[in-house]
Every structure is written in structure tokens, then in C-alpha cells.
Image: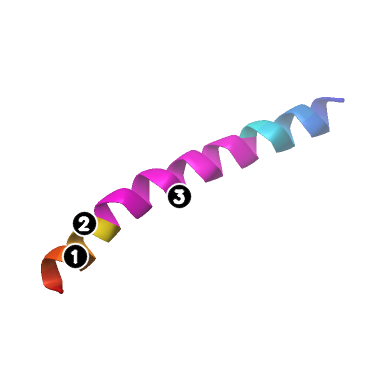
Amino acid sequence: ILGSVMGIVLNGTLVSQILMYRKPAVKKEKKTM
């Protein structure tokens, strides 16, 4: 049970980080384009 909970938390943090990094990355790409 603990392993599954940790997995969900890790997945959530990874997804949130990816979304946060994608937003500024897209803005930078648009500016360069």
C-alpha cells in the first residue's frame, strides 16, 4: 500500500514539474520563433 501511495505522489510531482517546465519553455520557443 505504501509503495503504491509513494508511486502516485511521485507521478503527481513529475507531472506537475513537467507542466510547469513546459509553459515557460513554450513561451521561450514562441519568442525565438
- Which residue does the numbered mark 3 point to in the structure image? 18
The residue type indicated by label 2 comes to: Lys
- Residue 30 image position (x, y, % from top left): 19, 65
- Residue 28 image position (x, y, % from top left): 19, 61
Q: Helix, strand or loop at disc 3?
A: helix
CA neighbours of label 1 inside 10 A, class few (<14), some (14 to 19), many (20+) = few
- Residue 8 image position (x, y, % from top left): 70, 34
Viewer-nearest residue: 20 or 5: 20
Cα separation, mark 2 vs mark 1, equals 5 Å
The residue type indicated by label 1 comes to: Lys
CA neighbours of label 2 inside 10 A, class few (<14), some (14 to 19), many (20+) = few
Cα separation, mark 2 vs mark 3, equals 14 Å
Point 81% across, 33% down: residue: 3
Q: For the view shown, which residue lies furthest in the left direction?
A: 31
Point 21% across, 56% down: residue: 27
Magenta stretch, residue numbers: 10-25
Point 71% across, 32% down: residue: 6
| Image disc number at residue 4 | none
| Image disc number at residue 27 | 2
- Which residue does the numbered mark 1 point to in the structure image? 30
Please state, as top left, top right, bottom left or bottom right, where the C terminus lies in the image. Answer: bottom left
